[in-house]
Image (cartoon, rainbow, N blue to C red):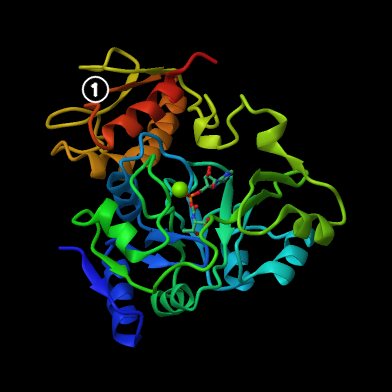
């Protein structure tokens, strides 16, 4: 059921068509195989989390063909431009302030005001980005908690039947994920990876704080922070009905206020795709009415685990 595509023109064209349809395609990069989906499509990005079985909506890396395309979704300052000129295309991911209204799904950024951007060097990845013509969200193409795939066969071991296709481009050259550097504020190394820290320091002309090493007990992935985005209104979970003054987000038939049902049919992928949009909309309505937000129960299976994780953070005392 998962198509195995050759890395030639016809395989790339087929892969780009699948991405356009909102389907998932695994493809080789010089670091590891990525599980790609249209970064502008809520459903495609929700499918990435579903296929990986991720228990949390950690933000994903957005892959683009060059620094000019990166500038369409992120704000590149002087440091970013210097690093991009030196190391893109290549195994460097930059976390940058995002350009508002750039059209990315809020699931890609976990609704943060920053975005992780990477310009891969692998010829197959570059051909796919060119054929598709848009930003591609891609975490490593493995089930959550398993090791990253460096061959198409590894991808199939973990994800066969759960994704539309894999482009077989042979083994990855680097075999280790990209180095992630945050340039939101002072430069911080978020993940050591395929590009050595020394190379970054030489280019930036300053030593780098390793955010992970500085505080091993503090999560550096923002999706893991208790409250990186919380609605302004208080949130009540497991709400079987709305109480007076509440804006109700539903799940399943006959629940929720008008336009605020995560999935009337109880589909968890659809619910994930709607989650951030509906939290924003409920917050807007609650602010107008001085009320709070109530959310119907969402089953804790499949993507429901990530949805509930996010909802618990939204409802956490602050
Ligand atoms: O080599 C790679 O980077 C591979 C290939 C496929 O490109 N991709 C990859 O993606 O490793 P993933 O999703 O496994 O790693 C994404 C990492 C996560 O640790 C996430 O927390 C971090 O990037 N990240 C993404 N957006 C972020 C943001 N806005 N702020 C901080 N960290 C972010
Ligand atoms: Mg990974």
- Using the image, determine if residue 5 lies above or below residue 265: below
- Using the image, determine if residue 98 lies above or below residue 53: below
Q: Is residue 114 left or right of residue 27?
A: right
Q: Nearer the viewer, residue 294 or 130?
A: 130
Specify the quadrant that holds the N terminus. bottom left
Q: Residues within 10 Å of mark 1 (few under 14, many from 20)?
A: some
Within the image, what quadrant is residue 263 found in?
top left
Task: Determine which residue is flagged by label 1.
Answer: 297
Q: Residue at x 69, y 34 (%)?
A: 213
Q: Nearer the viewer, residue 184 or 94?
A: 94
Within the image, what quadrant is residue 144 found in?
top left
Q: Position of residue 196 (x, y in %)?
A: 70, 56
Q: Nearer the viewer, residue 183 or 29?
A: 29
- As helix, strand or loop, the secondary structure at mark 1 comes to loop
Specify the quadrant that holds the C terminus. top right
Q: Position of residue 184 (x, y in %)?
A: 70, 46
- Using the image, determine if residue 161 lies above or below residue 312: below
Q: Residue at x 62, y 54 (%)?
A: 179
Q: Position of residue 276 (x, y in %)?
A: 40, 39
Q: Position of residue 70 (x, y in %)?
A: 59, 65
Residue farthest to the right? 205
Q: Total label count?
A: 1
Q: Is residue 83 left or right of residue 250?
A: right
- Using the image, determine if residue 219 lies above or below residue 206: above
Label 1 beta carbon less than 8 Å to ligand 1: no
Q: Residue at x 39, y 36 (%)?
A: 281
Q: Is residue 204 left or right of residue 34?
A: right
Residue farthest to the bottom? 9
């Amino acid at each position: 059921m998962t198509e195995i595509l050759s890395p030639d023109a016809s395989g790339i064209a087929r892969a780009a068509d699948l991405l356009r349809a909102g389907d998932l395609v695994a493809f080789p990069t010089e670091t590891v195989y990525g599980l790609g989906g249209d970064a502008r499509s809520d459903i495609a990005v929700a499918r990435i989390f579903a296929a990986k079985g991720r228990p949390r909506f950690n933000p994903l890396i957005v892959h683009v063909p060059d620094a000019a395309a990166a500038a369409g979704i992120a704000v590149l300052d002087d440091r970013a431009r210097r690093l991009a000129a030196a190391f893109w295309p290549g195994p460097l991911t930059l976390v940058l302030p995002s350009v508002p209204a750039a059209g990315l799904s809020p699931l890609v950024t976990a609704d943060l005001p920053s975005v992780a951007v990477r310009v891969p060097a692998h010829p197959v990845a570059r051909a796919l980005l060119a054929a598709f013509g848009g930003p591609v969200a891609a975490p490593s193409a493995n089930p959550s908690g398993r090791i990253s795939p460096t061959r198409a066969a590894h991808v199939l071991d973990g994800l066969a039947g759960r994704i539309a296709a894999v482009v077989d481009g042979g083994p990855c050259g680097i075999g280790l994920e990209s180095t992630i550097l945050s340039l939101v504020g002072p430069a911080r190394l978020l993940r050591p990876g395929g590009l050595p820290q020394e190379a970054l320091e030489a280019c930036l002309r300053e030593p780098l704080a390793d955010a992970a090493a500085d505080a091993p007990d503090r999560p550096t992935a923002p999706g893991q922070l208790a409250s990186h985005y919380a609605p302004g209104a208080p949130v009540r979970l497991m709400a079987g009905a709305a109480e007076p003054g509440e804006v109700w987000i539903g799940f399943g038939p006959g629940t929720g206020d008008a336009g605020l049902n995560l999935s009337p049919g109880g589909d968890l992928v659809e619910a994930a795709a709607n989650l951030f949009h509906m939290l924003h909309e409920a917050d807007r309505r609650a602010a107008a009415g001085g009320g709070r937000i109530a959310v119907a129960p969402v089953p804790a299976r499949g993507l429901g685990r990530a949805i509930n994780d996010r909802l618990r953070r939204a409802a956490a005392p602050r």
